[in-house]
Amino acid sequence: MASFAPAEAAAPQGDPFPLLGIDHLELWVGNAAQAAFFLEHAFGFHHVAYAGLETGLRDRASHVLVQGTVRLVVTGTLRGDTPVAAHHARHGDGVKVIALAVPDAARAYADALARGATGIAEPARAADEDGTVRTATIAAYGETVHTFVERDGYAGAFLPGYAAVEPAGPRGAAGGPVFEDLDHVVANVEAGRMDHWVGFYADVLGMAQMRHFSDEAIATEHSALMSKVMADGTGRIKLPVNEPAPGRRRSQVDEFLEFNEGPGAQHIALTTRDIVATVEHLRVRGVTFLPTPDAYYDDLPARVGPIDESLEDLHRLGILVDRDDEGYLLQVFTRPLGDRPTVFFEIIQRRGARGFGAGNFKALFEALEREQDRRGNL
């Protein structure tokens, strides 16, 4: 693969590689039907489309779930000799595709290859009575890929070849707050490879470095990591890249790399307008979160200043708070979604802040280390 120079630290400016947003995330999982049921009934996603044997697919089944502007696709294998089966055997449940919406998929693919990307799937056209979609795919970190999606006014449930799914009950039956948008997707890569992938996103996709967190900023007495946040020209797409830093013990990134058997997407951050109500709702549905120690809340008012939320509610629910020059944010992290300690969700509410909770890194890292210790992986 080509070598990419690290990007300069700068706010996103211009749009040398037009990107419209994250079209969808596709997770390859061990049992797509059960994963879809879990996301629907635990997290409140709406099951809107399906492709499988009934629609003509012979090697896999995919379920499409939507909430707000967030679109997740969970795909499972139908046989033991497929790419999905091989991927799952190695990595477990996890993100395979980070699909990027573009105005012209063929041009995006050609430009990406000209800038040093590795092609995976050449531009292709699919059409049905609801319109036309064009796609093309390039390689990213590990076995993760970016698929360019040009929807061209497509009016179907997801893509040609997918059948719309009628809701099992009333659309509002799940109740409770909903997620609004996909805030960011975090990559974990091997030590020494962060700057390579920062350079990839700068040189190939025209992104710029939005934030840089050193191993001093994200560290405990045991372990550390480094992180750089890449963003497109509009700031709609935010892709942080983490790598482990030397420490006395193994970091959360080291643990991820071991059990994912290589680089991959570590967590998916979803935005909400009311994090207190959302976390209460998810807890009732059985979702579990990383615990936050009581001591975290002792100096919270002095550290972050006035906030609209009740400190008692935040303490009770383990929600973290951080402030930057533009406002504050609230965030909380689920435990891993599957058996392996790999991919998980972050729930985030932004009240003006554009950062990523730098003031919470130590508390989050310590919470993750407690979970690592429970698993015998610290």
Image (spheres, rainbow, N blue to C red):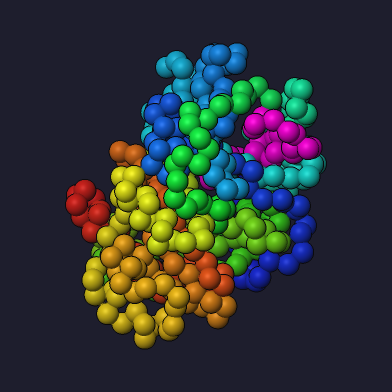
Kindly tell me whether residue 94 is visible in this rendering: no
Taking the spot 69% from the left edge, 30% from the top edge, the residue there is: 156
Asked which quadrant contains residue 260, the reply is top left
Taking the spot 78% from the left edge, 37% from the top edge, the residue there is: 153
| Residue 29 in the image: above or below residue 182 | above
Q: Nearer the viewer, residue 169 or 5?
A: 169
| Residue 64 image position (x, y, % from top left) | 55, 33
In the image, taking residue 327 as reference, residue 9 lies left or right, namely right
For this orientation, the residue located farthest to the bottom is 302
Which quadrant is the C terminus positioned in?
bottom left
* Magenta-highlighted residues: 135-159
| Residue 273 image position (x, y, % from top left) | 51, 61
Taking the spot 67% from the left edge, 50% from the top edge, the residue there is: 21
> Does residue 8 belong to the magenta stretch?
no
In the image, taking residue 342 as reference, residue 149 lies left or right, namely right
| Residue 106 in the image: above or below residue 162 | below
